[in-house]
Amino acid sequence: MSPLIHSTRALSALLIGLSTLGTVAHAGVAVEFDSNNDYVSYDYDFERSAQTLSSSPYSAICPFDAHTPLLQNSDYYQGPSLYGAYQISSSITEGPFSRQQIRNHKGKADAITLQSYSGQSWDGSEISLSALFLFKQADFLPDFQQGDFQLESFNCQWSTYFKGTSRDVTGRYLVQIGDAYYLSNYTFNMTNRGSNLLSAGMLGSVKWAAYNPIAKLNFDQEQAQFTELELSAVTAVGIYLEDDYWVSDGSVSSPYLVSIYGFKASGTVKP
């Protein structure tokens, strides 16, 4: 074999090897709101806030905006940018969102927090609450910010306090593919403190329903049609929670507190 041919083949092999390095798939944790991180040094309000829609009955909403986050990574908040929406309705008591923020817990995990406070009693008030929080691929960990992301597992940690009867706080996982959003038929109870892991072995049996948080934030699970969904090009992940109806009892000034202090999604991305 001539030296020229040998050199040409060696160069071709080197170029193929270099091009392969650029297309290596990455697997592992893609996005993480980590309970061990100190994201803020003080309670830091969301950059978008809820507005009152009506009174008697009272209702307020921070609508979903796919382009404007609740929080952006900054000098004040050093976590992944957060998108979302939330709303409350109450039959008797007017209680604005007194906490709509990343709450600084000294010595404990900082948390995505919602709470309503009123100087008057909520006793007997019929209440409904729903919320979603979303992380986009552009805000994933660096190795996962580009390419087709194959979702493989979810994990969430929370602490909630709902005061009253008929409490049933339900959580679902949320994905975005293209411009469409989907919620899982897989649910977990978030009425008190807890955590949930939706593992790779379980994820394959989960079905998903189309969800339009701009048209209607509160998910209508009775009308939803759940089907199988290919999770190979996921562009955002998150969590949805709701309690469609509970009745506050006692002379409490705050009928609920929602704190999400851990969220993680894992998978594989092919650049």
Image (cartoon, rainbow, N blue to C red):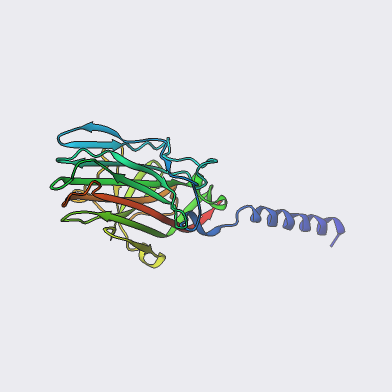
Quarter of the image containing the N terminus?
bottom right
Residue 119 picture quarter: top left
> Residue farthest to the bottom?
201
Spot occupied by residue 170 in the image (x, y as percentages of width and height): 26, 55
Q: Where 95 sits versus 187, above or below?
A: above
Q: Position of residue 228 (x, y in %)?
A: 32, 56
Most foreground residue, 151 or 125: 125
Q: Residue furthest left?
A: 124
Question: How many numbered discs sit on the rendered protein?
Answer: 0
> Which is nearer the eye, 253 or 144?
253
Residue 50: x %, y % from top left? 32, 36
The answer to whether 268 appears left or right of 246 in the picture is: right
Q: Is residue 197 left or right of residue 39?
A: left
Image point (25%, 47%), residue name: 254
Q: Is residue 174 visible?
A: no
Q: Is residue 164 visible?
A: yes
Residue in the picture at 85% in, 55% down: 4
Residue 191's spot in the image, x, y percent? 26, 58
Q: Residue furthest right?
A: 3
172 vs 98: above or below? below
Residue 13 vertical placement versus 42 (above, below): below
The answer to which of 142 and 62 lies nearer the viewer is 62
